[in-house]
Image (cartoon, helix red, strand yellow):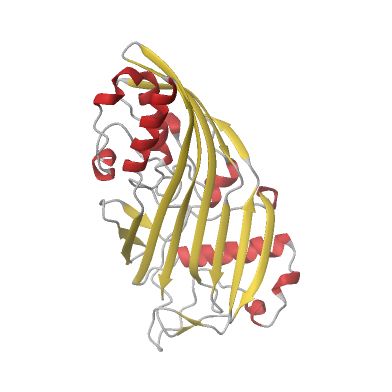
Amino acid sequence: MKSDYGSGNGNKLIIGLIVTLVVILAGMSGLIISMNNSRSKKAAATTNVYTPQYGTVATSAYSPVTAPLPGATTAAGQTAPGASANNTTAPAATQAPAAQNADVSTWSKAQIIQYASDAVNQTKAYGGQLSVHHMESMETNIISITGGSLAQRMANALMGAVMKPTDEIWEFNGGYAVDSEGAQQTLLLPNGKAFNLPESGVAAASASKSGENVVVNLTLVPETVDINTVPQYNSNAIGFLDVGSLNLSVLKVTSAAITYQGSTIRLTIRPDGYVARAEYTLPMYVSGSGTGMGISGNAEFDGAQTEIWELNW
């Protein structure tokens, strides 16, 4: 899920790339046999066909801080990751310690959302050195496309060739890291801004214990938007597909309907309130139309993108 879905690069929200390529194939189905299906994800990310634009709506911006480092004692009496024992500076946000002894399974939806929000934003504010194992994958199926079954088979084959899983180690310092494509990443999603999810945006929430950690599961309410509308909840918790900003040169996306079909967030939160692992899944249904070079076409597809962060404190 890199993109403004998530982190923001090649495969990162590659859904934007899918929309672009699907419409191109739909509009030019007579030419698809001659297309080069071996084009790499890297090449696709560096052309004018697709420009990832996830997380471009600014809300509740945060500023990475340099404390605490390993061994620091926070205001809540917890030992924070990343500092020396002489550093007692508290983090920008202090996770409530009540989860250590509480029956978290009895928490209300509002309590679970607040706990998750505190943990994500506290982690986002961490500015020390941190190694993150980042994995991303995408599954999609083209349901229909102008040009019939041949165009559909070719489009699905192209999607399979382009959408390769990524598996990288990102080294953060000062709140930022640079991925293999040279794109700047911030800790956790949404990329570049604070996590801000109201209770009205959550269809289901649960919390459970896993050893000393707390595991939180959130399912967002479904959202359907058009090409010029930002999904309120997904944009402030994970990311969104900004089709309206795509730079397609000779191709113009004339319409698109995007349904976010209940995105999920799974967080493993340490006793000190920092996130140890985060998994994001965005199931989507997209239908769109476009024109280019005097040709017009339509396409629809569904799929899901998964992004996993393992933080090595």
Report whether 259 appears left or right of 9. Answer: right
Residue drawn at (25%, 35%), measured in percent from left and top? 47
Nearer-the-camera pick, 269 or 135:
135
Image quadrant holding the C terminus, namely bottom left
Residue 72 visible in the current orientation: yes
Badge count = 0
| In the displayed structure image, the side of residue 38 where residue 223 appears, left or right | right
Q: In percent of the image, x 36 and y 45: which residue is there?
A: 163
Instruction: Please identify the residue farthest to the top as the structure is shown.
Output: 294
In the displayed structure, 70 sits above or below 109; it is below
User: Would residue 227 be visible to someone looking at this image?
Assistant: no
Residue 64: where, in percent of width, then height? Answer: 41, 63
Classify 298 as above or below 159: above
Q: Nearer the viewer, residue 161 or 259?
A: 161
Please state the horizontal and vertical placement of residue 177, each as a whole percent of the image.
32, 60
Residue name at image x 40 percent, y 88 percent: 86
Q: Position of residue 273 (x, y in %)?
A: 55, 74
Residue visible at 58% across and 81% down in the picture? 212
Judge left or right: residue 296 versus residue 42: right
- Tell me the quarter of the picture where residue 65 sits: bottom left
